[in-house]
Image (spheres, rainbow, N blue to C red):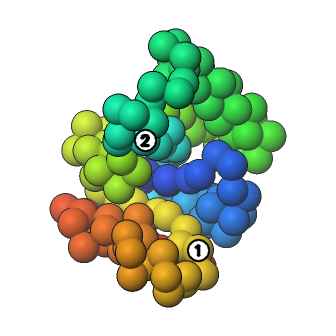
Amino acid sequence: MYKSILLTIDINDPASWERALPAALELCRDCGAKLHVLTVVPTYRMPIVEGFFPPDFEKKAIRKTGEALKTLLDSLLPDDRHAEAHVRVGVVHSEILSAIKSIGADMVIMASHPPDRMRDFLIGSNADRVVRNSPVSVLVVR
C-alpha cells in the first residue's frame, strides 16, 4: 500500500517520536515501505534576529542536528530496521511539505502536541498546516 513513509520529528522533543516512531515502524513492516525520518532546524525569518548568530551557525546547526538524529535513530531502531535520516532548514511545515515531494513519500506520520490555544490562535500548529496542505495521507499520532 505505502512504499515510502516520512516520519517527522523534533529532535529536541521526545514526545514527537515516542508514539509516532512505533506507528511508523509498524506501518513500514506491514507495507514493506522505506522509512524516512525528517527533522527541521527552524529559521528565524528575520534578518535582525539572524544578525545575533555567528555566520557559520546554520552549518553547525545542520551538522549537530544530523549527528543527533543519527545517534537517536541508532538507539531507537531495532537491528532489522533502517531509516534514512534527513535534516532541513526552514519553516517547519513548509520543509515537511517540500520533503514529501522530494523524497516521494506517500504517507506522513507526525506527532501532535497537546493543543495550546494561544499558540494555535497566533500561529497554528505545524501538524494542522501539514494535514491541510499535504498531497498525501497524514497520520497524526497523539
Q: Which of 102 and 119 is in front in this view?
A: 119
Amino acid carrying label 1: it is His
Mark 2 is surrounded, within 10 Å at the Cα level, by few (under 14), some (14 to 19) or many (20 or more) other residues, namely few
The answer for how far apart the CA atoms under marks 1 and 2 are is: 21 Å
What residue do we see at 32% from left, 65% from top? Answer: 130
Amino acid carrying label 2: it is Tyr
Vertical placement of residue 27 versus 99, above or below: below
If the image is split into quadrants, where does the N terminus sit? bottom left
Disc 2 secondary structure class: loop
What residue do we see at 69% from left, 65% from top? Answer: 15
Disc 1 secondary structure class: loop
If the image is split into quadrants, where does the C terminus sit? bottom right
From this viewpoint, is residue 35 visible?
A: yes
Horizontal side of 59 relative to 15 (left or right) equals left
Label located before the other in sequence (1 or 2): 2
Q: Return the residue at label 1.
A: 113
Check if mark 1's residue and mark 2's residue have beta carbons within 8 Å: no
Vertical placement of residue 93 versus 142, above or below: above
From this viewpoint, is residue 30 visible?
A: no
Residue sitting at the far top: 56
Residue 140 screen position, x and y as percent: 47, 74
Horizontal side of 141 relative to 106 (left or right) equals right
Residue 132 screen position, x and y as percent: 24, 73
Q: Which of 107 and 10 is in front in this view?
A: 10
Horizontal side of 117 relative to 105 (left or right) equals right
Vertical placement of residue 62 versus 34, above or below: above
Residue sitting at the far front: 48
Mark 1 is surrounded, within 10 Å at the Cα level, by few (under 14), some (14 to 19) or many (20 or more) other residues, namely some
Q: Return the residue at label 2.
A: 44
Residue 65 screen position, x and y as percent: 62, 31
Which picture quadrant has residue 121?
bottom left
